[in-house]
């Protein structure tokens, strides 16, 4: 895809992958900014933004509560933060992804 973008934008360019990285980075940023405004976070917020009716939001929240038991958000505390930070699976995944 990067080569196709480079050929479309500047067909005679000899800049190499610099142009590819700039264009793909800009596309990623534009997509992320659009998603920030378009994707609705949770059913209770979707109801406030009139994306769902009250009945639909209640139905979805009940299903989430039955399935996961966390439809009502709880506050983040330092204890919870360090509990999740001490999870070895998290660090193993980090090492696996960021190894040289």
Image (cartoon, grey):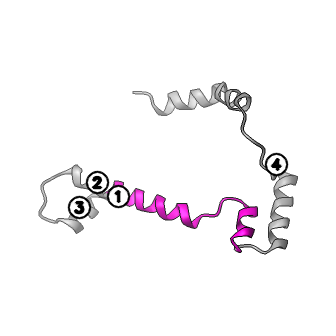
Task: Point out which mark residue 6 bears.
Answer: 3
The CA distance from mark 3 to mark 1 is 13 Å
Which residue is disc 2 drawn over? Answer: 22
Report crowding for label 2: few under 14, some 14 to 19, many 20 or more residues within 10 A (C-alpha): few
Query: Where does the image place residue 92, in percent across and percent down from the top left?
Result: 58, 27
Observer-nearest of 94 and 96: 94
Left or right: 23 with respect to 51? left
x and y percent of residue 22 in the render? 28, 54
Q: Which residue is mark 1?
A: 26
Disc 4 secondary structure class:
loop
Quadrant in which the N terminus is drawn: bottom left
Rendered image quadrant of residue 75: top right
Whether tag 3 and tag 4 are in contact, CB under 8 A, the answer is: no
Q: Could you tell me how far apart the alpha carbons at marks 3 and 4 are, in whole angstroms?
A: 46 Å
- Residue lying at 81% horizontally and 71% vertically, measured from the top left: 56
Q: Magenta stretch containing residue 90, yes or no?
A: no
Circle 3 or circle 1, nearest the eye: 1
Residue at image position (47%, 60%) is 33
């Amino acid at each position: 895809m990067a080569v196709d973008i480079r050929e479309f934008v500047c067909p005679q360019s000899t800049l190499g992958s610099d142009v590819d990285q700039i264009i793909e980075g800009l596309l990623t940023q534009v997509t992320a900014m659009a998603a920030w405004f378009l994707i609705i976070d949770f059913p209770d917020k979707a109801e406030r933004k009139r994306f769902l009716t009250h009945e639909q939001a209640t139905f979805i929240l009940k299903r989430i509560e039955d399935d996961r038991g966390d439809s009502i958000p709880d506050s983040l505390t330092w204890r919870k933060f360090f509990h999740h930070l001490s999870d070895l699976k998290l660090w193993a995944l980090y090492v696996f992804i960021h190894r040289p």
